[in-house]
Amino acid sequence: MSYASRLQDGHIAIYLLHGVIERQTALVRNYTRKHIERDYFAAFIRELRAAGTPISMDDVLRYSRDGGPLPPRPFAITFDDGFHNNLSVAAPVLAEQNVPATFYVTSSFVDQNRMGWIDRIEYAIERRPSGSLELPWGRRDYSGVENSKALLSEIRRHVKQDRRLEPDDVASDIQRQLGFEPVFCSDDPLDRKLTWDEVRELDSDPLFTVAGHSHTHRILEYLDDATLQWEIDTSIGLLRDKSGIVSRHYSYPEGMQYCYSQRVIDCLRSRGVECSPSAEDGVNAVPADPFHLKRIMVV
């Protein structure tokens, strides 16, 4: 698919990425292409640059509030989570093409070089190509690459949609069943996160903006009021205290329609956040609600 085909006059296309790596080497890990290859990313950026007009999320916020006229076929680039490869691999490509980007970072990932729960499970299954797991919804046996990928997709679906499950507890239990003590940190290119010094370095570039993406990457709508407030306050506070960043921008973890609500939006607004795009697929006519903007996933 040509991502440039989503560009339209009179609409803003916001692209959602997570990571960019030099090459794919794992058999199972990254099967969803959360991290895309550098050459693929560079070609994607060149294609957009040739077909449209790059704008920043500050520009997106202004157009969302004020309406057009828009530049020809405008697009914005965003990254979620805070992977180190955003700085080491993606940023030089963006700088070469003079394309701005916003990087939404999960503060505990940065503060502790912490892996996301599904990355912890992928890490274990990559190292145990066959096995049996007792999952909260039943026993599953798996063997081989394709069967492992199918199992991971099933785990993703169940854990994301069942608010009773604590994702990191599920990940720790799976790691133990596969013979590992719980692993929370890794410097593999698929796992390594930015440090606070690197967050400051990235944000100091006029092309780039760093913003919030929660503290622990839990689905915000699943949280009670007190935990929701703590989750947002902690992420905003760490960005401010560790990197001097004022969080006008934010993005919802997971970002699908069931992952946020007016309650979540009100909590963000009351803390000075002015824009938080979703992960719902689509492009955006303007004016638009800056808390309901759609994005296009790049894989």
Image (spheres, rainbow, N blue to C red):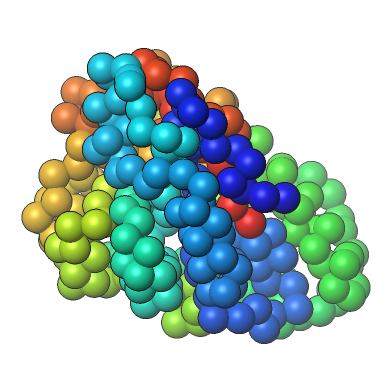
Count of labels shown? Answer: 0
Above or below, 299 against 66 in this view is below
- What residue sits 69% from the left and 80% below the top? 26
Q: In the depicted view, which residue is nearer to us: 117 or 203?
A: 203
The answer to whether residue 172 is above or below residue 10 is: below
Residue 238 visible within the image: no
Query: Looking at the image, which is closer to me, 40 or 49?
Result: 49
Q: Position of residue 6 (x, y in %)?
A: 60, 38
User: Looking at the rendering, which quadrant does residue 196 occupy?
Assistant: bottom left
Where in the figure is residue 131, as x and y percent of width and height? 84, 73
The image quarter in which residue 173 lies = bottom right
x 51%, y 68%: residue = 42
Please say if 149 is above or below 124.
above
Residue 296 placed where, x, y %?
56, 41
Q: Is residue 165 above or below residue 223?
A: below
> Residue at (84%, 49%) from the top-left corner?
138
Residue 202 seen from this side = yes
Q: Residue at x 54, y 37 (%)?
A: 7
Q: Quadrant of the C terminus?
A: bottom right
Left/right placement of residue 31 relative to residue 107 reads right
Q: Position of residue 88 (x, y in %)?
A: 37, 77
